[in-house]
Image (spheres, helix red, strand yellow):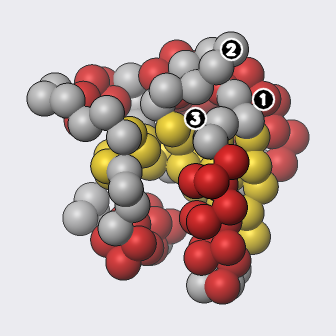
């Protein structure tokens, strides 16, 4: 069972994805904004972070940059999640330090493959 941090401000998205991830054996911790996500990542040391990019207080781009710049969190894999899939967003997310990128609405089977690959140190899907 992996400990996942899901940084997401939309309650419907949290409800749906959290339940599905927990049914697949993962422990899921929720942060509602990028600043809270940073604090929880430091204290909880999750195995992987699912990072929404459009967040209040501190957006997912900057939160990821800070996570990857800090020695205590730089090794935690981050999958960026975006509902505003614009041309170049994946490149921008990877440049910010994200290890992978996926779009919303979530294709759950695809996301599970990406999570598994990053947890085992495998290549991006």
Q: Secondary structure at mark 1?
A: helix
Drawn side of residue 15 relative to residue 40, left or right? left
Q: Please give the name of the residue rendered at 68% of the width and 61% of the height, measured from the top-left corner.
A: 15
The part of the image, by quadrant, that contains residue 26 is bottom right
Residue corresponding to mark 2: 57
Query: What is the tally of numbered marks visible in this picture?
Result: 3
Q: Earlier in the sequence, mark 2 or mark 3?
A: 2
In contact (CB < 8 Å): disc 2 and disc 3: no
The part of the image, by quadrant, that contains residue 83 is top left
Looking at the image, can residue 117 be seen? no
Residue 9 against residue 123 in the figure, above or below: above
Q: Earlier in the sequence, mark 2 or mark 1?
A: 1
Which one is closest to the eye, mark 2 or mark 1?
2
Q: Earlier in the sequence, mark 3 or mark 1?
A: 1
Badge 2 local density, few (<14 within 10 Å), some, or many (20+)? few
Residue 122 against residue 95 in the figure, above or below: below
In contact (CB < 8 Å): disc 2 and disc 1: yes
Residue corresponding to mark 1: 36
Drawn side of residue 4 relative to residue 75, left or right? right
Drawn side of residue 117 relative to residue 86, left or right? right
The part of the image, by quadrant, that contains residue 86 is top left
Instruction: Say which quadrant the C terminus sits in.
Output: bottom left
């Amino acid at each position: 069972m992996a400990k996942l941090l899901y940084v997401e401000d939309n309650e419907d998205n949290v409800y749906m994805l959290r339940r599905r991830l927990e049914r697949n054996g993962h422990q899921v911790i929720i942060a509602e904004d990028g600043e809270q996500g940073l604090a929880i990542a430091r204290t909880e040391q999750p195995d992987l972070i699912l990072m929404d990019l459009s967040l209040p207080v501190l957006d997912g781009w900057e939160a990821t940059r800070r996570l990857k710049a800090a020695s205590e969190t730089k090794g935690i894999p981050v999958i960026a999640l975006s509902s505003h899939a614009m041309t170049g967003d994946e490149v921008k997310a990877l440049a910010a330090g994200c290890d992978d990128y996926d779009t919303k609405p979530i294709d759950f089977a695809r996301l599970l493959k990406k999570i598994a690959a990053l947890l085992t140190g495998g290549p991006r899907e």
